[in-house]
Amino acid sequence: MTQLFLAFARTGLSTGALVLFFALLTPLMRKKYTAGLRRAVWLLLAVRLLLPFSLFPAFLFPGKEAPVQIELPAAVAETVAPLRHPGDEAALDLGQPPSEVGHALPAGEAHPENADAAAGGQPGAVPPPGSPQAENSGALPALLPQKPASPVPAPLSPLGIAALVWCCGMLLFLLDQLLRYALWRRQLRRWDLPLSPKLEQAVDRAAQVVRLRRPPPAFGNDRIHTPMLTGLLRPVLLVPPQLAEDPGLPLMLRHELTHALHRDLFWKGLLLAVRALHWYHPAVWLLCREAEQDIEYACDEAVLRRSSPLTRAAYGGALLAVAGMNARVPALTTHFSAGGRSMKRRLEALFSQQGKRRGGALFLCAALLTGLLGGMVGCGVEEETAPLSSSASSLSDLPLSAPTDAEPSFSYYASTEQGLFQTIPLRDQTNAPLNQLIYSDFSSGTTGPLCPDPDCDHLHAGCPALFPATDMLLMGVVADRLVLAYSSQWPQDPSLLSDCEFPPYTLCVETMALDGSDRRPLVTLRPVEAEPETGYAATHLYFPYTFSDGSFLYLCASPSFAQPGHALFTLLRVSLSTGETEPLQDVFEPCLGVYSGHLLLGGIDWQRGELRLEAVPLEGGMRRQVYCDYYGQDSGYFRDGSTLYLTNSALGTLKKFDLLTGEETLITDQLPPLPDRASQRCYLPTQVIDQKLLFSVSFDDSSSLSLNIKRWAVDLETGKVSEFVFLPPEQSHMEPFWHQTIFAATADALCYSVPEESGFSSHLVLADKASFWAGEPQLRYLANAPGK
């Protein structure tokens, strides 16, 4: 609700300035332009006030924030930061843009198909029965701090109170207006009578004159004094029978039926909604008053267009005859009478002989100003996140340029200079599903289970290469040890199987030596069903949410007391030396990684056409914007540590942005043009290998009537662009259909997979670097794992 209040406040602030501007021009517009133009301008501004977002300035001013920024201090909005609600991931996308854009996934981010499986489940498993890990897990101390079983409601901030007052005022205003109308119409309906034949003929003739094909139902009612139109969904024309002999009745009926032709009851309902949303805004009340007056003046103009002076005099006489009658009527009605200053202006307009312009060009200028000014005012919250851990030291003053350790990457595979670690699915002797950790040695070309025991059959529960079946196992090499984070669905308590169709997940973190020995469990995060006090409702284990700074592993969990409106997840820190786990802070949106002791948040705002990234210290502190610039369908980005690489296919540029210093550098403006019939409008950056950024473009090959693909590498030091391929000439026909990722890079070779002849399985290869970058890869095949 607070975010909606801020959005409408921003819209009211920017549009209110336009209202005041056109109000100053109103005397001139009355002399030079028709009432229909003024009516259209006011209604345009009213529609803008109902839209709590910018219209199109994002692509007119790429890469720029709103020129006028109103920052609310963190003390005023301490319970409101961050600006984006947890449910806004559809307007702020993190690497899953619309399919027609073809945007590349950020560094280390899981593919959506893989992420769905991880995000949808609740992690929870233990090592298989009988294994050393299962025997030791029960003896592990409770490493997670105690958490309350239910949330403690936070006090409302001043901004939250303002939003609550705004909402209550809006509801009270609507209730008052709609209740007044309902009671008035209910009392009046009792006196509705069928029209006399004479009045029916008068209504039919008036409808023919104004060219209204379907006039609203008409009734007589002697409790009113002038004809009126009422009802938003089902308009009804009410005619007083006592005016049947009045010579001005035909003109009055034409006026009311012109309201029906213009659908003015709909526009009056819209003005009512605008007043409700901006009930506190004086400029909005001014807009609604002027709009309702010009609605009447526009009907007068339409009725008297090309009429004689005698007709105008008769119309003025009819206005004077009913002046002040029906003056107090509720909303959602129109009536012929007027009073006070409005009557004087209507009479003056009747006899104005000066030709007035319709002002189509002026209306277009007003529409352009409305769209532009709507995005030139920003309203935000200066955010600050409080540390949740009492033992955490504040890093709020840590500069973004502070030195940092290397970021060990976590993925479905890990590598060293000597070999590659990955997993394959298996089933043990009891037919239980397992994951087997295998190792491919680059020197010997052998591949096998990562187990130091040569006599092991690699199928029994005690084998260190076996892990419980899981839909997610991430690994990384940290300090010469292999760190594995995995989730499994085998319950520690068998009674849990009867409580739910799918057992809850348990998340485990373990380390082992690079030769498979010395496997040690670090921590086990059990589900709330097993440990109601310290358990978690769910854990997130996929690329953007699992990362390390060399000393700690960072995971994301949803606490058992998570409720709507609370944080999306809690950031947990696991010590890779002791296994001690502590919560750091609540996070309200997906994250991109960690660097320099900071958590990187943000992503693509497709609505504003921006890529916006923010950094917050891991242990609490001020949230800072580190990058904000234009991002459209011709854009692509890739993050490698603290460096952001940005491509633009329209300009053919590749830029480098340093998140630590804020420095932007042009690497090249000579990117190749997109091929004809390209399936996306942007380049797709995928990896940085050997100081080269790899990107690709897929397109329809008109010669072969099939999908094709082109790949390029940009030297990040010289800017030189060269084309490359993954497969040798004899397999070039498979290039467009084979998703390529380089698993490892050694001093003289690159490791990746190539398709088998059948095309349904893969084979690991080592490609000589020199031949690979020359576009003619020479491959050395590694042995496949047994049974793969």
Image: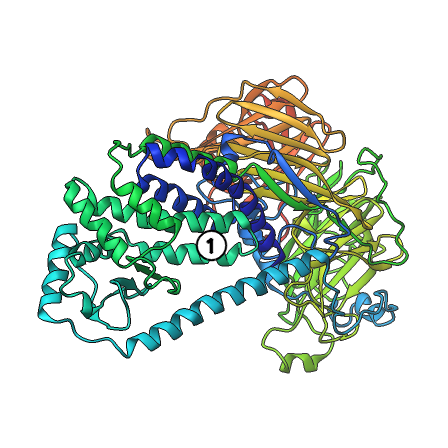
The foreground one among 663 and 765 is: 663
Looking at the image, residue 526 lies above or below residue 573: below
Point out residue 274 in the picture as x, y percentages from the top left corner: 47, 54
Judging by the rendered image, the residue that carries numbered circle 1 is: 274
- Quarter of the image holding residue 414? top right
The foreground one among 294 and 786 is: 294
Q: Residue at x 14, y 41 (%)?
A: 308
Point out residue 68 in the picture as x, y percentages from the top left corner: 62, 36
- Quarter of the image holding residue 626? top right
Task: Give the colour scheme shown.
Answer: rainbow
Looking at the image, residue 680 lies above or below residue 194: above
Which type of secondary structure does the marked residue at label 1 adopt? helix
Looking at the image, residue 370 lies above or below residue 250: above
What's under tag 1, amino acid-wise?
Val
Q: Is residue 755 left or right of residue 245?
A: right
Q: Is residue 762 left or right of residue 135?
A: left
The foreground one among 731 and 399 is: 399
Point out residue 601 in the picture as x, y percentages from the top left corner: 68, 45
Q: Residue at x 68, y 51 (%)?
A: 82
Quadrant housing the N terminus: bottom right
The foreground one among 157 and 36 is: 36
